[in-house]
Amino acid sequence: MSCKVALISGASRGIGAATAKTLFEAGWAVSLGMRQLALPEWADGAPDRVHQFAYDATDQAVAQEWSQAVTDRFGRIDALIASAGIMIPKTPIEISDAEMTEMLEINVQAPRRLAAACWDALAASGEGRIIMLASLSGKRVKSAQAGSYSMSKFAVVGLAHALRQAGFDQGIRCTAVCPGFVATDMAMSITDRAPEVMTQPEDLARVIQTLIDLPNEASVAEFAVNCQLEERF
Ligand SMILES: NC(=O)c1ccc[n+]([C@@H]2O[C@H](COP(=O)([O-])OP(=O)(O)OC[C@H]3O[C@@H](n4cnc5c(N)ncnc54)[C@H](OP(=O)(O)O)[C@@H]3O)[C@@H](O)[C@H]2O)c1
């Protein structure tokens, strides 16, 4: 494949779906990680640049299988966009062990496994890119209800920095993307603000496209973006 290739988890909806469309329209080949396979209508035009894979983040073997399927199909991996995630709006006191384990598994362990599975291919490209969908909840704890989710997202920010350290000499650049409210199902389920006052997934997709297009010499460790004024972000 002569064009660059991106793996995108959480590609069925929200930020992952918007990013897949934006990258596809920019000429990338995209591998869509989804629990329920469904080809987006925008993919009709150039099916040779679209690959689908049944990805469930709770399956520990799936990352390696997905990475292998993409290198078999396209011969390369240039970017990993880890967008699949869940939000359980409970304090660290209310949340059960099982719920916390599930959130850490999907939000932290699964993207770590994806990075590990794609690592050799990303290094082979000499300019591999990893985008971890973290959150402003990985930078500050905004409310008690967001506390357990924040724990997982602080870990994602740490993961992104650790990957940046591990891959820098091989040309891998990793960015923790840290949005506030983005107008997707996840945000709608926890706030009654109108979608139009939130960051739009398409705008975040443009940010991600820019981040992965930047040269090795323009490494962005964290990118914070907010729809509202806060003291630091
Ligand atoms: N929306 C926000 O305000 C916001 C703000 C900051 C950060 N983020 C982060 O951005 C990322 C994307 O969020 P979003 O707003 O796009 O959320 P969303 O619209 O709720 O979409 C979540 C995505 O994650 C996938 N997913 C959930 N559990 C999965 C599992 N076990 N295996 C595989 N895929 C799974 C969903 O797939 P299904 O369709 O199969 O359920 C869906 O594609 C998340 O990591 C989130 O924490 C979101």
Image (cartoon, grey):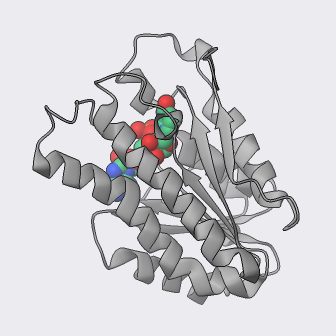
Question: In the rendered image, which quarter contains the C terminus?
Answer: top right
Q: Position of residue 114 (x, y in %)?
A: 47, 71
From the viewer's side, name the closer residue of 28 and 63: 63
Left or right of 130, for residue 1: right
Q: Position of residue 80 (x, y in %)?
A: 60, 66
From the viewer's side, name the closer residue of 70 and 222: 222
Relative to 34, does residue 92 appear above or below in the rendering? above
Is residue 83 visible in the rendered image? The answer is no
Residue at 41% across / 30% down in the picture?
A: 141
From the viewer's side, name the closer residue of 37 and 223: 223
Is residue 34 visible in the rendered image? The answer is yes
Left or right of 16, for residue 189: left
Quadrant assignment for ligand 1:
top left
Q: Position of residue 64 (x, y in %)?
A: 43, 82
Relative to 12, does residue 167 appear above or below in the rendering? below
Number of labels in the image equals 0
Relative to 98, does residue 163 appear above or below in the rendering? below
Relative to 193, does residue 143 appear above or below in the rendering? below
Occupied quadrant, residue 62: bottom left
Residue at 38% across / 64% down in the picture?
A: 110
Residue at 58% across / 69% down in the picture?
A: 163
Residue at 27% across / 30% down in the picture?
A: 89
Left or right of 185, for residue 83: right
Question: In the rendered image, which quarter contains the N terminus?
Answer: bottom right
Left or right of 192, for residue 76: right
